[in-house]
Structures are given as C-alpha cells and as structure tokens.
C-alpha cells in the first residue's frame, strides 16, 4: 500500500422512503454533511466519485455538483450492483494513491421507493414460441428452471452451507434477523426500528425458504458520503481533524473466480474469502482483532455464511457462532450493530458508504446508545451479485 | 410438435442436457463461450450431461412475479459426472419435511406450455430417484 488514506469526514441520511426528496437531494445532504464533518469545503475536493445503480445513466455526480458546488473537478459515476458504494470509495482511494488527488469526496445514493422483488422475470406467454437469448429459451425460465429471485438465490447459498456443515438450519438463519432487528432499535437512522421474537421472525410470511419476510432487506431511499484525505495533506490538518479521522488500513475489491457451479448459482463465498485474506494481509490484522463488522446481510442466509467467509468463526462453525450470541452487540464480534441491510435498510448505491459511516462513528466513539465500547478496528463488507466483493478495514486514529 | 424450453435440453427417446465442454480442462458451460472461463482454452466439444445426481441445495419459493405459480422448489443438482444444474425439483411436495439435502434425483421432462400453433415447450426438472 502506498500512502495512508484517512476518512476525514462522513455523514449519512436516515434510510427509509422519502417522497419529498429525490436522489440528488439525498446525495447533496450526505455530501455537505461529510464536508462539514471533516471541516473542509467542496472547493477543497480534487475528485468526486458518485455511486448509484438505478439512475446510473443520469450523470448523478454532476447533478450533485450542481446542487452543492460546480468546481470543475473530475467526476466518476460508479455503478457495480450492490458493491457500488464500496467501488466508489475505492475509486477515490486509487486516485489519492496515484497522487492525482489529495482530497476526494465519495457519495453513494439510491432512490428505490417500494420496488418489491428486484429480479425474477414475469413469464411472458408468447403466442408463438421462438428461441431467444443466450440459452435459446422459448419462454421465461424463472420459476421453471429454478429461481432468479434474490431471496431464493441467497436461500440456496445458505442451504448449501447447511448441506456442508452441522448445526445450521432455519432457526440459525432466523436468529441472524432477530439480532439485526434488535440492533436497529438503537440506530436512529435505520429504516425499521422494531424488535421481534425468534418466533415472529420464523412465523412471518415465507418468501423463499428459509428466508421469511423479516429475514429479507427492504428496498428504500438514502445516501451516505465520506471525505478522504491522503497522508501528505493529512499532516497539515488540525489536531482535532486528525484525532477524529479514521485510517483506511485495507481496501480490496475482488470478483468471482471460476468455480464449477458458478454458472448456475452465484458463488458469494470464494470472492469474499479472497477479499478477506487480502484485506487482513494489507491491514496486518486478523478477524480476532475486529471490534465490529458491518457485512452484507441482504438476506439472513447471507450473513450466516459470511461469518465463515470472513473468518469470524471456526471453519464450519457459523451455526454455533450465532447460537452462542457471538455476533450480538455485546458478544465476541459484534456484527451489523447498525441493524444491517435487513433493518437499517439497503438503498443500494449508499450501502457500501453507509457501512464506512457506521464503523467510523464507532471508532470515533460517537455512536451514542449503540456504541461498541472501546472500538478500535472495524471491517466493512459488501457483495454485488455478478459478482464483486468490497472489503475495507478501518482503524481508530490514535492521535490524541 | 415439441420443442425444448432451452437449447441445452435435447429431446427424444432419452432426453438429456448437452454442455459445451472445454477440450483442454473439461470445464462445462451451458451456453456459448468465446474462451473457457477456467483456463482460457478456445476449443469446445459437445458433452452429454448425466441425467442422475444429488440435490446440492434448494429453496422453496413462495413469492415470485405474479404470473409464476408458487410455491415451487428451486434446486441446484450436482450430476453424477460433476456438473451443476439449476432447475426445479418436481414430483415432490414443496415442504421442507419432504426434501433432504443430498437426496438422489433424476432428470425428467414435461410440457410447460403450448403456443398458438400447437407447439409444445418441453421443460426439464429433477424428480426424486
Ligand atoms: Zn478450460
């Protein structure tokens, strides 16, 4: 790793459904909040990266500039499925490492409203069957040749882990969601803030066994932003700015390498394991050093398998890890104390920046009621199907 | 007249799946590739995929797009010659008690729809063996 890079300022909007604000409003709020938090202005920025998925062709970054300051700096509009925010963050990191920028702004934003299922096509009953597409299909195959829906795809990823390991089933997956809903009650920015019993989680409407409704992330609106600074400029900042800054000690992006089953079922494991190994190596820390983790719990089944992929538990021990309460806020390795995607929400472009906001807030000791005591190292993780995995490891400043 | 739902399903007396198999490393692909995603090899041969295998993972889908009948069982099957195939688990009640990971399954075909000209689209699924 070349020069050290720091999160100087960070901010996020509440996640939810906001009929009175569009994506540009949300992004601008997050951006100005992050600039103010870092004690800098838009005129100090050398680069802007804007992560957004569903309006990717709209020049979102330039629209944000028109809302908060058109200074003529380069804008990178970034779109990379659910890894969009993390990829935008890495875009600015790479620019600073390449000495093309000293200070940069990252904004992630999504305006989804109530979108329902994000994949899984309606079956068109064509009047005359003609082969089309890469597989020469004569009609829609979703629901005939398995499922394209996200709750189903991630259910299968979880059940594959259950196939290979002891002590993992419906109840263990449900406990993950119970935890994240409980955590969210302490997060004022979460989309939902309601506690549920394990029975309520398991008894809520089944979406795709074993994922019930309360085990699936909602769609929603929101934005998050970070101001990043390289070590040269960092040295000239005030003592207060330096002490609140959070060091980015690892930044990794991977894609899914070839595995035999990958063409039929997205492999969310190998690329996470590869990213985790590289991130721990870069940062010089191990999973046992982590004070907290914000990982990609798009579905409860996903969170459970990532305990293992990130090395938080013994190999094969993810069921036991949740059974003994290790990932609860007061447990051995708190996971998703924000409420996670399941309850904090998942406005896609914002997610990978919002998890950096969350971990940074704990490392600064500013997380209020949900503060993880003595937090000094944290990890953020996202997966975008397709697939990409982004991992960042953050460390407390250490400058008093 | 019957036509296959997808082009990698071969109908006839013994319906089966066909994959493009890398001539260098043996990796199999449903659908065309310019080069092997595993080794970069550019030669492929057409390979018949075993019709029997084991259930690798599944999900019972209760919520889908409005025109898709639910519940149904989505499954990934590992065939006896080591190829992963995604399809529905058929001839089984869509209930977790009725489905066990690792269970033996075999490929079966059925008519999934008929068009205006009377052509039947034949799909495949995996049934308990
Ligand atoms: Zn090959």
Image: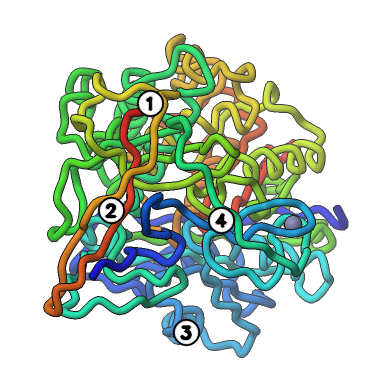
In this view, B119 is above or below A191: below
Mark toward the start of the polypeptide (4 vs 3) = 3
Depth check, mark 2 against mark 4: the one in front is 2
Depth check, mark 1 against mark 3: the one in front is 1
* Chain bearing mark 4: A
In this view, B71 is above or below A232: above
Q: List the single residue furthest toward the top.
A: A324
Q: How many numbered badges does the structure rendering display?
A: 4
Residue A144: which disc?
2
In 3D space, how far apart are the residues under numbered discs 4 and 3 (Cα atoms)?
24 Å
Neighbor class of circle 2 (other Cα within 10 Å; few <14, some 14-19, many 20+) is many
Residue closest to the eye, B119 or A330? B119
Helix, strand or loop under label 3: loop
Q: Is the residue indicated by label 1 positioned so its CB lies within 8 Å of ligand 1?
A: no
Q: Which residue is mark 3?
A: A59
Residue B118 in view, yes or no: yes
Q: Position of residue B61 (x, y in %)?
A: 24, 42
Depth check, mark 1 against mark 4: the one in front is 4
Residue A339 in view, yes or no: no
Mark toward the start of the polypeptide (2 vs 4) = 2
Q: Position of residue A373 (x, y in %)?
A: 54, 22
Quadrant including the C terminus of chain A: top right
Mark toward the start of the polypeptide (1 vs 3) = 3
In 3D space, how far apart are the residues under numbered discs 1 and 3 (Cα atoms)?
37 Å
In 3D space, how far apart are the residues under numbered discs 2 and 1 (Cα atoms)?
30 Å
* Chain bearing mark 1: A
Q: Position of residue A183 (x, y in %)?
A: 36, 29
């Amino acid at each position: 790793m070349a020069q050290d890079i720091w999160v100087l300022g960070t901010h996020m909007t509440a996640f939810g459904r906001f009929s009175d604000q569009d994506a540009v409003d949300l992004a601008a709020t997050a951006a100005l909040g992050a600039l103010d938090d870092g004690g800098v202005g838009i005129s100090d920025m050398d680069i802007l990266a804007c992560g957004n998925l569903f309006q990717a062709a709209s020049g979102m970054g330039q629209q944000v500039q028109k809302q908060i300051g058109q200074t003529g700096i380069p804008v990178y509009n970034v779109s990379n499925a659910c890894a969009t925010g993390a990829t935008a963050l890495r875009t600015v990191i790479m620019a600073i490492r390449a000495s093309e920028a000293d200070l940069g702004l990252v904004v992630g934003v999504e305006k989804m409203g109530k979108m329902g299922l994000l994949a899984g096509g309606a079956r068109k009953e064509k009047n005359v069957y003609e082969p089309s597409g890469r597989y020469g299909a004569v009609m829609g195959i979703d629901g005939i040749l398995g499922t394209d829906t996200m709750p189903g795809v991630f259910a299968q990823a979880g059940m594959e882990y259950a196939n290979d390991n002891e002590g993992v089933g419906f109840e263990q997956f449900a406990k993950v969601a119970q935890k994240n809903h409980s955590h969210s009650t302490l997060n004022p920015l979460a989309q939902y803030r309601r506690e549920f019993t394990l029975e309520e989680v398991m008894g809520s409407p089944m979406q795709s066994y074993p994922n019930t409704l309360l085990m699936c992330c909602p769609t929603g609106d929101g934005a998050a932003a970070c101001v990043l600074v390289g070590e040269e400029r960092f040295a000239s900042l005030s003592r207060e700015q330096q002490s609140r800054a959070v060091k980015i000690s690892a930044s990794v992006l991977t894609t899914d390498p070839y595995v035999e089953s990958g063409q039929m079922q997205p492999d969310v494991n190998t690329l996470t394991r590869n990213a985790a190994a590289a991130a721990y190596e870069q940062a010089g820390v191990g999973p046992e050093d982590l004070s907290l983790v914000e990982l990609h719990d798009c579905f409860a089944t996903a969170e459970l398998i990532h305990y293992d992929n990130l090395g938080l538990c013994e190999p094969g021990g993810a069921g036991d890890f949740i059974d003994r309460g290790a990932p609860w806020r007061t447990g051995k390795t708190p996971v998703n104390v924000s409420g996670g995607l399941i309850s904090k929400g998942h406005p896609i472009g914002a997610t990978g920046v919002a998890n950096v906001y969350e971990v940074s807030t704990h490392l600064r000791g500013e997380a209020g009621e949900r503060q993880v005591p003595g937090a000094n190292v944290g990890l953020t993780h996202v997966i975008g199907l397709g697939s990409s995995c982004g991992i960042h490891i953050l460390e407390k400043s250490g400058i008093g | 007249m019957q036509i296959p739902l997808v082009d990698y399903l071969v109908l006839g007396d013994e319906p089966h799946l066909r994959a493009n198999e890398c001539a260098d490393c043996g990796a199999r692909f449903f659908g065309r590739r310019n080069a092997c995603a595993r080794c970069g090899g550019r030669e492929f041969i057409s390979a018949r995929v075993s019709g029997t295998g084991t259930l690798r993972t599944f999900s019972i889908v209760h919520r889908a797009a409005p025109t898709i009948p639910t519940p149904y069982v989505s499954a990934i099957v590992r065939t006896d010659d080591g190829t992963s195939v995604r399809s529905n688990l058929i001839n089984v009640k869509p209930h977790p008690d009725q489905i066990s990971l690792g269970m033996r399954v075999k490929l079966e075909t059925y008519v999934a729809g008929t068009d205006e000209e009377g052509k039947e689209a034949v799909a495949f699924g995996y049934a308990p063996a």
